[in-house]
Image: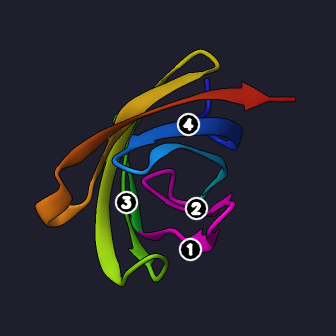
Amino acid sequence: MSVAGTYECVTKSPMGDQKSTFTVVPGDDGKTFTGTNAGQMGSMEVEDGKIVGDDKLTWKMNMTVPMPMTLDCEATVNGDQLTGNVNAGAFGSMPMTGERKG
């Protein structure tokens, strides 16, 4: 099954649960992807999105609110479920879960 889709996600951050809509758009090569992660603090573009094997995603996002920092992210897609982590540097790793919609 493809990792493509729109996922309704929750990231457990130090500021509480952050809900977002994460879109995954695989490239023609099947090894890269683009997309966005949009939530109440704005939208972030996926950068350096990679698809590892059939089900693992790695990517970066540049957050600007509440402070500028680069987030290093990884997740695994199993059916319609997404589980992974968002690494926020000095703030540590935050668990992220999601469910594919539609």
Query: Which residue is under mark 1?
Result: 45
Classify 48 as above or below 92: below
Frontmost of labels 4 and 3 is 4
Camera-near label (1 vs 4) is 4
Residue 19: mark in rendering? none
Disc 4 element: strand
**Counting residues from the N terminus, which is met first, the one under dot 1 or under dot 4?**
4
Whole-percent x, y for residue 19 in the image: 63, 44
Residue matched to label 4: 10
Q: Which residue is mark 3?
A: 59
Choose mark 2 or mark 3, whichever is in front: 3
Q: Which residue is mark 2?
A: 27
Q: Secondary structure at mark 2?
A: loop
* Alpha carbons under labels 2 and 3: distance apart: 14 Å
User: The disc labelled 1 sits on which kind of residue?
Assistant: Glu
Q: Give the magenta-colored segment's residue range.
A: 28-47
**Inter-mark Cα distance, 4 to 3:** 17 Å
| Amino acid on which the number 2 mark rests in the picture | Gly
Asked whether disc 3 touches disc 1, contact meaning CB atoms under 8 Å apart, the reply is: no
Write the residue at 62% across / 68% down: 41
Toward which corner of the image does residue 53 lie, by quadrant?
A: top left
Asked if disc 4 and disc 3 are in contact, CB closer than 8 Å, the reply is no
Picture coordinates of residue 67 (x, y %)?
38, 81
Residue drawn 46% across and 83% down?
64
Counting residues from the N terminus, which is met first, the one under dot 2 or under dot 3? 2
Give percent across and percent down for residue 79: 59, 15
Q: Which numbered mark, 1 or 2, is in the foreground of this view?
A: 1
